[in-house]
Image: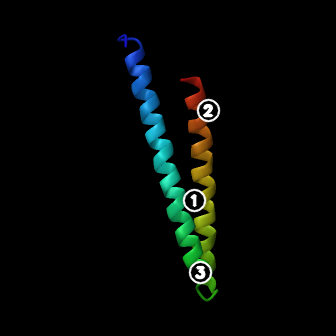
């Protein structure tokens, strides 16, 4: 591997690592969402569900951005 392609390969590996980490985060969010669904609905649970959904959207946006970057590498 030439020196010119080494940084690009390292960037690609880093991007893949970040995508994997975001997927793990999404899995934990799913677990939290399932736990919240099993709780008696009240204002606190509703607020946590809203927060989980917002975090899920942010994770999806980050995954989409990384996929776009990955296609460029």
In the rendered image, which residue does mark 3 sit on? 45
Percent of width and height locating residue 37? 62, 79
Q: What is the basis of the colouring in this image?
A: rainbow
Q: Give how far apart the Cα atoms at labels 3 and 1 are.
A: 15 Å
Percent of width and height locating residue 62? 57, 45
**Height in image: 46 above or below 72?**
below
The answer to which quarter of the image holds residue 10 is top left
In the rendered image, which residue does mark 1 sit on? 55
Q: Earlier in the sequence, mark 2 or mark 3?
A: 3
**Height in image: 30 above or below 72?**
below
Dividing the image into 4 quarters, which one contains the N terminus? top left
- State the count of labels: 3
Q: Which circle, 2 or 1, is nearer the viewer?
A: 2
Q: Earlier in the sequence, mark 2 or mark 1?
A: 1
At horizontal 63% and vertical 64% (from top left) the residue drawn is 53
In the rendered image, which residue does mark 2 sit on? 68
**Height in image: 37 above or below 28?**
below
Left-right relation of 28 to 52: left
Label 3: which secondary element: helix
Residues packed near mark 1 inside 10 Å, few (<14), some (14 to 19) or many (20 plus): some
Percent of width and height locating residue 46? 63, 78
Q: Give how far apart the Cα atoms at labels 2 and 3 are.
A: 35 Å
At horizontal 57% and vertical 52% (from top left) the residue drawn is 59
At horizontal 53% and vertical 23% (from top left) the residue drawn is 73
**Height in image: 55 above or below 48?**
above
The answer to which quarter of the image holds residue 51 is bottom right
Label 1: which secondary element: helix
Front-lying residue, 38 or 52: 38
Determine contact: label 2, label 3, CB under 8 Å. no
**Residue furthest front as drawn:** 1
Query: Residue 31, labelled with which disc?
Result: none
Q: Earlier in the sequence, mark 3 or mark 1?
A: 3
């Amino acid at each position: 591997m030439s020196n010119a392609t080494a940084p690009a390969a390292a960037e690609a590996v880093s991007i893949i690592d970040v995508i994997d980490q975001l997927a793990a985060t999404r899995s934990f969010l799913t677990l939290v969402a399932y736990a919240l669904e099993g709780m008696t609905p009240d204002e606190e649970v509703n607020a946590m569900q809203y927060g989980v959904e917002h975090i899920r959207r942010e994770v999806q946006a980050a995954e989409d951005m990384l996929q776009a970057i990955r296609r460029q590498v």
